[in-house]
Amino acid sequence: MTKVLYPGSFDPIHLGHVDVIEQASRLFGHVVIAILHNPEKHGGVFTVEQRIHLINGALADGPCAGKYSVKAFPGLAVDAAKAADVDFIVKGLRNSGDFEIEQQMAHTNLAVAGVPTVYLPCSPERSSVSSRFVREIAQYGGDPSSMVPSNVTAALKEIFS
Ligand code: PNS
């Protein structure tokens, strides 16, 4: 069985993530969703425990039920990949900006630890969804419901209303 790691901050999970996880769970046997620290992002809206809860709430009854697990890992994505014993890392690509960043990370992760990366294109209707925009829209009283699963919309409303 092919097992893959899908790393990210997931603060919070959005429909672009769901799209990539569903694609990966169709293509591969098992997707380990890894919550990692992004050194460029400080603070955060949701705690790691809340992020895990929101991910499970978004996926548990969907098409990838039984084909994923979710866990937080300290440190590097390659160490998470080794700890989770996966075959490779999966990343979603929205646009050429993502490609530039992800290509650097993929080359580095391969060079330092021999862990390969596979890219999956996100579906066109998800190409502008980002956790940052979701957080900003919710913080300023906007409606993020077209970008996130319904349990995430409810959790954001609870925090920012
Ligand atoms: O959802 P994000 O914030 O775009 O995900 C970025 C993330 C968490 C996958 C990335 O920052 C990461 O891999 N962090 C772990 C630290 C690491 O492995 N750094 C070296 C990257 S080459």
Image: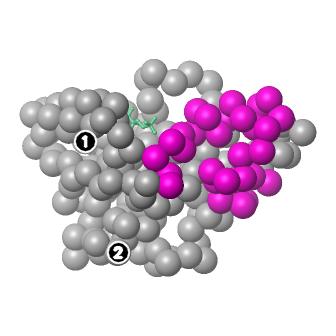
Give the magenta part as a residue range.
Answer: 125-154
Using a 10 Å C-alpha cutoff, classify the residue at mark 2 as few (fewer than 14 neighbours), some (14 to 19) or many (20 or more).
some
As for residue 134 lying within the magenta part, the answer is yes
Residue 16 in view of the camera: no
Task: Assign ligand 1 to one image quadrant.
Answer: top left
Residue denoted by label 1: 78
The image position of residue 21, as x and y in percent, is: 42, 62
Quick one: SS at disc 2?
Answer: helix
- Residue to which mark 2 is pinned: 26
Quadrant including the C terminus: top right
Distance from mark 2 CB to nearest ligand 1 atom below 8 Å: no
107 and 49: which is toward the camera: 107
Q: Residue at x 22, y 53 (%)?
A: 118
Disc 2 to disc 1, C-alpha distance: 23 Å
Q: Quadrant of residue 45?
A: top right
Q: Amino acid at mark 2?
A: Arg
